[in-house]
Image (cartoon, rainbow, N blue to C red):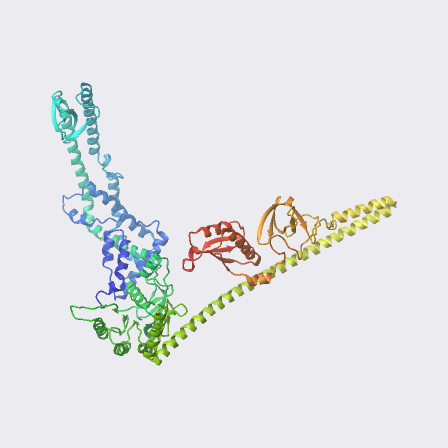
Amino acid sequence: MNYPLNLAEKLGFNQVKEEIKQLCLSPMGLEYADKMRFSDRFPLVKQWVEQVDEMGRILGEHGGEFPQTDYYDLRSYLSPLQLEGHYLSADEWRDWQRALTVLYETIRFFAAIDSSEYPEIHKITQHFLAKGAESEGDFRQILPIIQDLDRVFDVNGQIKETASPALGDLRRQRIKEEQSLRKKLDSYLSQAYKEGWVSKDFSLTLRNGRMVIPLAAEHKRKIKGFVQDESDTGKTVFLEPADALAMNNEIKSLESAERREIIQILSKLSDRIRPLTPFLAHAFSWLGLIDFIRAKALWGSEHNAIKPTFIQDKPIVNWTDARHPLLEKSLEKIGKMIKPLTIRLEEDRRIMVVSGPNAGGKSVTLSTVGLLQFLFQSGCLVPLAEGSTMGFFSQLFLDMGDEQNLENELSTYSSHLSNMRHFLQHVNENTLILVDEFGTGTEPSLGGAIAESILEKLADKGCYGAINTHFGNLKSLADRQKGLFNAAMRYDTEHLEPQFILDMGKPGSSFAFEIAQKIGLPKAIIENARKKLGKKQVDFDKLLLETETEKQIWESKNASLALANEQALSIKENYERLKNHVQEEQKAMLNAAKAEAKKIIQEANQRIEQTIRQIREKEADKEKTKELRADLEQFVQKELKIVAPLKVVSETPGIVYANSPIAVGDWVVIKGSGDEPTLGQILELKGKDAVISLGAIRSTIKLNRLQKIVAPKQQKKSTAPLRGIDINDRMAQFQLKLDIRGKRGEEVYVILDQYINDCLLLGVPEVQILHGKGDGILRTLIREQLKRYREIKNITDEHADRGGAGITIVTFK
């Protein structure tokens, strides 16, 4: 049996229950949610958890087909319906029409899905699907009743004229009589207008269920008839003319006949459904169970909860990335993320002694362990990482919070001792104990000694659990006592801030002096306290502090080295890939050049031999020989593509212009750019335009404004020095993450363009661009710029756990 009685409230389980209840659609589901309890029956817990897991998969795979509205509770109507002669009114049948439809569609939905994929859900549904003696009732028998309801009621819940032939005749006859009566009364009203007995804003109306005309009270005797009513002021009377009396009586008679016919229709419907009331009672209870399981599945999805691996025979805790669901939700509201806990409680390390500074997360650790185990054994999914294993405990014991009881004269410490007495009397090998601030509430040396004695006894009894403490003797006991082990909440010794990370296997310091110093306590008081504490304890805390500091330093260095190693490997891979590509391209170009040269030489030899043969055969004179040589020279220049020599046509020192056509990769100068010409390199040709690189800037300029030049070696241009690209240097300096937080828009364009060019040059498959969240302006600006690159395959947000919308992932083709 769990202890104390309000364990669920202390652990926060009641808050989780309320969240689940809010996700229920029906009163039936709420009733099941109210009954949620911790169970020590493993088969039952296993069935509960698997039902919720299966429902979560159903919602994920078939959510659009699964009916999730109008879960009406009609159980209150079932008992009266069992009495002969009782019938449901038209208003009551409106709810029944939709409720039976949803019930039928829900059962049919579960009948259609593969039962082998969802065996536990199938077990609770199969009774409605089978036929025969073992069946609870075939759900298909609901369909004829739904069809009858659709025949009787329209979409607004009104009884149709076609509900029965007699009803149709009565309504048509009544409408005919009403039209005749209205025509007659309109004639009286027109006469009254003409005679001035009534104002023009008056019209026909009903009084006492009869159609009448309004008249001024002083003229009521002008028309023979019966006064059915008068206004509050008495100035207007509502008169039923004498010759309209019979027609009104006929209409009232028809209305009575219509009501009797409607009662007969409703009675027949009630007689149809009366034999099904036992089946429907069971079916609506089942619908409530489905609603409850669905609510638990939705809660699990909201908290990224899973169905862990669970073991019946071993009460162990083997959790990765355990998260307190209520704390996680609270932190999300203020834009913070929870620090998951990795916890291992095994046979030889059963009780975890957690130490560390105040407000460092020790109590949260205990609450997380207790709540997650309680949730699991109440049939819920739990917020853990895949691969985690849940053991099974027969009882949970908790000692947390101040339990002073003035009525029973119990102090805080007495209350703790009372709890410990209960623990020692009832714990066993299948008990999970959780104790917060173990041994506090009395004189420290005495409290520590008693706590140590109690902890030794608890360890001997073989129970599992976790305790929080500041006592050094309990930390020492955990190092030498079998079944106990130390754990500590990590603390940033540089900034003196808790990190809310659990380190298992070593004790932690309370960092009392460091925290006192941080909050500004006078240094003299702190030093005096160190002296009073004694050298042994001070040295122990100092050792823990130094160990923690060194651990954090080495962890930081290891992380940096691991990142650098990863980047180096990536750069090496890119370099090897680029090197191989260049070698292959070089080889292909060389082979192509050799083939082209061979072809050119063959053509040249043939042309020379042809020219010599023509000179010999024709015995050409000097002029003819000169003409043939001119033809040969023209062939050399045209066919062999030998162009005119370069000429220096500029007075600017160091710039040599070329007369050949401009191509990609050529260097050019912008015409008319002044005394200090602007130089750039051709990146792309687009018709009459060219994209050129001006240092770190790309620009599109008309071709007729550019003049080709010989590639400069050492000369300056308007934006940046011209120099070759050092691939090795680019690889060494390249980073897989670009941080542009705080940059202005014009800066972003230049930085991002240069970075993407480097990515394409080095063949990087994927990079990260860190821009932060803020108002999203910088993120939008970056993404608009990235869409211009055809080489980019995909642009997505980073995973929510690693930065979310604050980081953009860019994947190249």
Q: Quadrant of residue 483?
A: bottom left
The correct choice, above or below, for 214 with respect to 437 in the image is above
Tell me: 707 left or right of 90. Answer: right
The correct choice, above or below, for 360 with respect to 791 in the image is below
The correct choice, above or below, for 192 with respect to 42 in the image is above
Q: Quadrant of the N terminus?
A: bottom left
Tell me residue 779's x, y (percent). 46, 52
For the question of whether residue 296 can be seen, the reply is yes
For the question of whether residue 53 can be seen, the reply is no
Tell me: 400 left or right of 590. Answer: left
Tell me: 266 left or right of 784. Answer: left
Tell me residue 427's x, y (percent). 24, 73
Which residue lies most toward the top here? 195
At 45% across and 68% down in the image, what residue appears? 556
Q: Nearer the viewer, residue 311 or 662?
A: 662
Tell me residue 324's x, y (percent). 32, 63
Tell me residue 380's x, y (percent). 30, 61
Q: Quadrant of residue 133?
A: bottom left
The correct choice, above or below, for 722 with respect to 618 in the image is below
Q: Tally the marks.
A: 0
